[in-house]
Each structure stands twice: as C-alpha cells, then as structure tokens.
Image (cartoon, rainbow, N blue to C red):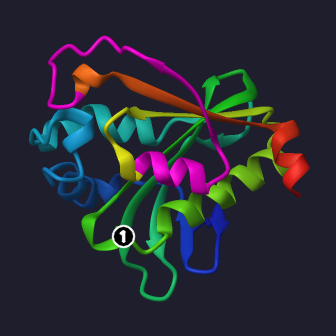
Amino acid sequence: MHVFLETERLVLRPFTEADADQLLALDNDPEVMRFINGGAPTSRQTVEAKVLPRLLHDHPCTGTRGFWAAEEKATGTFLGWFEFRPLDDHDPAVVELGYRLNQASWGKGYATEGSRALIDKGFAELGVERVTANTMAVNSRSRRVMEKSGLTFLRNFTADWPDAIPGSEHGEVEYELTRAQWQQRH
C-alpha cells in the first residue's frame, strides 16, 4: 500500500476500486451526508460510476490524487476521506480542502489532524499558494475544523442547490489560508 501521508494517528493513502463498499457505507449514513445531500441514500451504481472515478483522478500539476482514504494508524480501520484537490488540474496554486469521516471518528480530532497535515504538505512540498474550504453556513462542526486547521472566514455566498436541503436557505461559507499566513505561523 502506498502511503501519501502519515500523522500521529492517521494514514492517508490513495483510493482503490476495492474501497467501494466502505464508500457506499460512508455515503449511506444520513448524518454523514446531512450537509451534503440532506441525508439521501447513495446507490452502489453511483459510487462505482461517479464517486470512485472522482476519487481515483490524478492531478498532473501535483502528480498526486486529490482525495485520500483515511485509516486509523493503530488499527487500519477506514475512517473516511480527505480532499486536497487543485481547483485547476494544471495549476497547484489553489486547492480545496475537504473531509468526510464516519460518525465513529467524530469528535476525536481526526479531521483537524488530517487537515493540518495536508495543509503543511501542500505549502511545504506541493507548490500550493492558497487553501480554500466551503461548507453550509449551518454546519458548525465543519466550520470549527476549518478554524482549528488555521483557515479564516472569507465570505458568505449562495450556492445553486439543485434540490434544497434543510439549512441551505442560510447559504454557504468559504474559509481560506494563504501561503503567507501559513508561513507567519511556522
């Protein structure tokens, strides 16, 4: 298994097609998906035809994937995934940070730990100049992870939701961290 990044408690590795069952379980937990699609179920066909290809995509500008399977280092248990994806396939300057972890891992600091490690690697090794992250304005847990990871609030905006879900009427928020801000802290 190729390891992209290790932290004290996490291993981040590339996804494989063998991860389909774990992704299906993650995307079928209504609480995990509450701020993504309102908790609607995801079919195996969607995971295999849409989700996995997105997670398996290599980005030429970084020579890496943009999504990483997260496992607990001590047990190898699948926890979910982290996103650290260039917004432009050919330019590593701006990346989007994201995370989707199973409920059993919530409240243990994994999202912050993985996010901080990805941010550090991005600025130190991958040529990143700006990290951005978005969530629904009402998603206080995700917003707190962004803040604890060093990102600061940038703006509120309204996304075009094809199907409104509870809370979407309050809009979205964007957080960011620039290389200059990161360097000031290190």
Residue at (31% x, 11% y) in the render: 160
44 magenta-colored: no
Q: What's the magenta region?
A: 142-167
- Which residue matches tag 1? 78
Between 168 and 131, the residue placed more toward the observer is 168
Q: Can you see residue 53? A: yes
Left or right: 11 in relation to 52: right
Left or right: 154 in relation to 161: right
Q: Is 164 drawn above or below residue 52 in the view shown?
A: above
Location of residue 11 in the rendering, given as x and y in whole percent from the top left corner: 56, 71
- Work out which quarter of the rendered image holds the C terminus and state it: bottom right
Location of residue 6 in the rendering, given as x and y in whole percent from the top left corner: 64, 71
Residue at (29% x, 24% y) in the render: 170
Q: Can you see residue 60? A: no
Left or right: 66 in relation to 44: right
Residue at (18% x, 58% y) in the render: 25
Between 136 and 127, the residue placed more toward the observer is 136
Secondary element under disc 1, as helix, strand or loop, is strand
Between 113 and 58, the residue placed more toward the observer is 113
Q: Is 59 drawn above or below residue 117 in the view shown?
A: above
Location of residue 116 in the rendering, given as x and y in whole percent from the top left corner: 66, 58
User: Callout 1, which amino acid?
Assistant: Phe
143 magenta-colored: yes
